[in-house]
Amino acid sequence: MAVTDSLSRAASTLAAVLLLSFGSVAASHIEDQAEQFFRSGHTNNWAVLVCTSRFWFNYRHVANTLSVYRSVKRLGIPDSHIVLMLADDMACNPRNPKPATVFSHKNMELNVYGDDVEVDYRSYEVTVENFLRVLTGRIPPSTPRSKRLLSDDRSNILIYMTGHGGNGFLKFQDSEEITNIELADAFEQMWQKRRYNELLFIIDTCQGASMYERFYSPNIMALASSQVGEDSLSHQPDPAIGVHLMDRYTFYVLEFLEEINPASQTNMNDLFQVCPKSLCVSTPGHRTDLFQRDPKNVLITDFFGSVRKVEITTETIKLQQDSEIMESSYKEDQMDEELMEPLKYAEQLPVAQIIHQKPKLKDWHPPGGFILGLWALIIMVFFKTYGIKHMKFIF
C-alpha cells in the first residue's frame, strides 16, 4: 500500500513538473511571437509638414507641402497625427484665379488643397520657435491637442520642410532662419525624451544637403533635393497665374507616391532613385549612416502610411453581450455612412496620368479692347459714308 502511495505521489509530482515546464515553454513561445511581432518597436506614424515661405511668388512651396499632406492622408495617416504648418494661405489669396484651390500641375486637374485640409499653424504662427517647440514638446499647457506632436518611443515620424535656404540654414518667412545645428540639437532632444523610434527627414530647398550634415542622433534617415552649392529648381510654370506650381524634387516624389498603396512593398532605396539629376537638374542627396536598418528593408509605408498593429494584453475585457444593441448600432452606422457624402479628396486623377495628358484648350474670348476698337471702326465708317447730317435719323 505504501509503495502504491509513493508511486502515485511520484507520478503527480512528475506531472506537475511537466505541466510547469510545458507552461513555461508555451509562455516563452508566446513572448517570442510577441517580440517578433514588435521587432521594430514601431506602432504609430506621425508627420510634421512645414512650408516656411510667404507671398504669392512662393506659391510652389505651399503646393509642395500640400502635395505631401495629400499623399500621407491617402495612405492612412489621419489628421490627428499630422501637424501641418503653412506660412501663407494661397487658396484664399486675392491673386488666385480659382479660390479655395491649390494646383500642383499646369493641367489644373489635381487640387492638392482638397476638401478637408486641416492647417494647424498658419501665417505668422509658422516660426522657428513654434517649430522647435512642436518637435521637442516644450509647448504651453493651453496648446490644443491638434497643435501637438504626441509621439512616443514607438513612433515613426516624417518631417518634410520646404522653402528658401542656403548653406546650413532655412529661412522662415524671410524674417528669421533655422540653422542645421539648431535642427540637429532639436532631434537630439527628441531622442533623449524618447519622442521617436525612427525619423525620416526630407527637405526641398537650395543646398538642402547642408541641413542634415550636423545630425548626430540615432535612427535618422535624411533626404535633400540638392547638394551644397546647388540650387533646387522650380517646375510646372503656369502663365495664367504667373508663378511656378511646384518644385522639381517634390513633383517627382509626388508622382512616385501616387503609385504607392498601403500594401505596397516598395522600399526607401526606390525613393532615393526618384529624381535623378537628369530630371531635377540639381543632385538629390541622402544620408543613412545614422539609421540602424538597411534602407532596402524599410518600406515606404513605414513613414508615409498608417500602422495597424495590436498589443497583446492579459487583462480581461468585458464585451457587450446584447446582440440586439450591436445590430441596432450597426444599422445606425450603415445609415450614417449612406447619408455622408463621399469625399473625393483621395480619389482624384493620379499624377502619372495627368503628366501624359495634353493641356486643355481654353475657350477663346475677344479682349475688351478688341470690342471697343470694332465699335469705333463702325462709327468712323458710318460718319465717312453718310456724314453728320444723317445723325437725326438715328437718334
Image: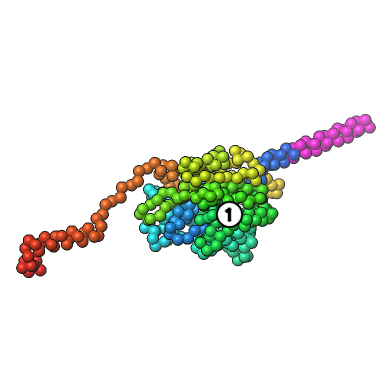
- The residue segment tinted magenta is 1-27
Residue 223 percent coordinates (x, y): 56, 47
The residue indicated by pointer 1 is 168
Residue 324 percent coordinates (x, y): 56, 50
Q: At 50% across and 50% down in the image, what residue appears?
A: 231
Give, as a three-letter code, the residue at label 1: Gly
User: In the shown orientation, is residue 285 left or right of residue 389?
Assistant: right
Q: How is the image coloured?
A: rainbow
User: In the shown orientation, is residue 107 left or right of residue 6?
Assistant: left
Q: Which secondary structure class fits the magenta region best?
A: helix
Q: At 86% across and 32% down in the image, what residue appears?
A: 11
User: In the shown orientation, is residue 366 left or right of residue 358?
Assistant: left
**Most distant residue in the right direction:** 2
Asked if residue 77 shows in the view, the reply is no
Q: At 53% across and 55% down in the image, what residue appears?
A: 165
Quadrant assignment for the C terminus? bottom left
Q: Is residue 77 above or below residue 10?
A: below
Tell whether position 281 is magenta: no
Q: Residues within 10 Å of mark 1 (few under 14, many from 20)?
A: some
Q: At 62% across and 57% down in the image, what residue appears?
A: 182
In this rendered view, identify the residue nearer to me: 63 or 154: 63
Tell whether position 7 is magenta: yes
- Circle 1 SS class: loop
